[in-house]
Image (cartoon, rainbow, N blue to C red):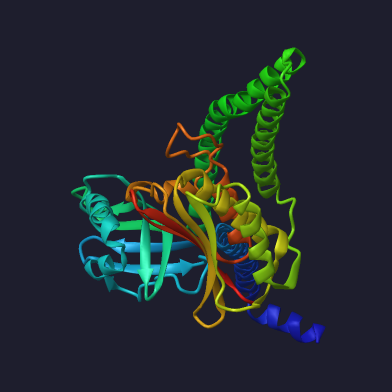
Amino acid sequence: MIRLLLYAYSENEHLIPVFWVVGILLVVLLVYGIFRQRRVGAKLSKELLELEKARQNNIEYEFILKAMKIAVWRMDPKMRLATYETDFRDGKDSYVSSPDTPIDSMWDFLEPSDRQRVKVALEDILSGRSDSYHQVYRVKVGNTMYWEESYATISARDDEGNPTSVVGTSLRIDDQKKMEADLISARNKAEESDRLKTAFLANMGHEIRTPLNAIVGFADLLPVVESEEDRNQLIREIQENNHKLLKIIDGLVSMSKIEAEAKNLVMSQTDIVPLLKGIADTHAQLVDGVSLIIATHFPYAELYMYTDITKLTEAVDHLMQNAVKFTQKGSITLGFDLVKGDHVRIFVRDTGKGIAKEDQERIFERFVKIDEYIPGTGLGLSVAKAHVQSLHGNMGVESTLGEGSTFWIELPMS
């Protein structure tokens, strides 16, 4: 082999330089190829890294949208088309347009009272008159109505500065609106409570002081009164004012228990005929039986219903007290009738002064007194209504001014 090469070398003296040149070229090409391969590899690695970062950013972006429960949409101002790109909002009943939906067809889904306001704001950003958009509105889809809040901005413009793309987000805010409504309700209740406390102090200052002054005054006179008849009269006055004071305190205690929900229902099967008769007999002792009489209307000798005896008794008793207080002559009738087959209506009908139509709703509010000259706390009817409502019943009044009133309680029998 060596001899052959030496022979070839000895025969052609230019062959070796050619081999050297070709070898050097091959080495240069090899080095260049390795260098280029490394550059391409580095570039590919960088592109793969960028792709991984983009993929990671998309995952994080989607995660944020899911966490915030947001829908992303895009609008083309020139073509006047809208497309929802992603939607992570709560509720499957949310409005979602199909790709390339005409913008003008979306207004029909807005609540009419919000439609014009939202339309003007969106047209401003689509035309470039505004750079941003923020609206809160109601959306109606079928029979469902929900609240939504949207933000939008211009994402691209043409050479003349006109918007070519508007991107926005939408978020359902039903929970936020409910919270706002609850806060408003709580504020109103607090204001009402403040008003009632003021009314309470104004009423109680007078109502409690009146019988107390009478009790203290008559008690001071007892030691100096020599006549037995006068002494007995003073004792009767003291007892009567004691009874008035106890009624006032009972009303306050009943209302406080209702407010604190301290009285739970104790339901039992009860014959209400003897219960109502007992209430009628008690109040019959408080009238003279001549100018004013207590009557009853019981169409059945017995009537059983499933109820709380204590609350029912207290509610009816308050109605009877109210009737006695506002009726000077004629009659007061306590009775009941069956209505709707499975309900009983207990009523107290009097021939008293009656109630004006505009006052017939107010009288069931706490501390409301239609006639300030007649003693009372304004709590009786509100306590009665609270008891009736706790028994899943209704309470109302029918009255004509100057002709009398009929207060009624309607309760389920079971």
Vertical relation: 84 (above or below) 283:
below
Vertical relation: 9 (above or below) 370:
below
Residue at image location 55% in from the left, 53% down from the top: 319
Q: Where does the image place residue 61, in percent across and percent down from the top left?
A: 55, 59
Q: Is residue 33 left or right of residue 310?
A: left
Front residue (pair 280, 27): 280
Front residue (pair 180, 302): 302
Answer yes or no: is residue 254 visible: yes
Q: Quadrant of the N terminus?
A: bottom right
Q: Is residue 267 left or right of residue 201?
A: right
Q: Where does the image place residue 43, in percent across and percent down from the top left?
A: 58, 61
Image quarter of residue 130: top left
Q: Quadrant of the C terminus?
A: bottom right
Image quarter of residue 140: bottom left
Front residue (pair 299, 237): 237
Answer yes or no: is residue 42 visible: no
Instruction: Check the image and name the residue furthest to the left.
Output: 160
Vertical relation: 215 (above or below) 166:
above
Instruction: Check the image and name the residue furthest to the right.
Output: 2
Front residue (pair 161, 386): 386
Residue at image location 58% in from the left, 60% down from the top: 389
Residue at image location 52% in from the left, 38% down from the top: 367
Q: Where does the image place residue 336, in percent across and percent down from the top left?
A: 54, 70
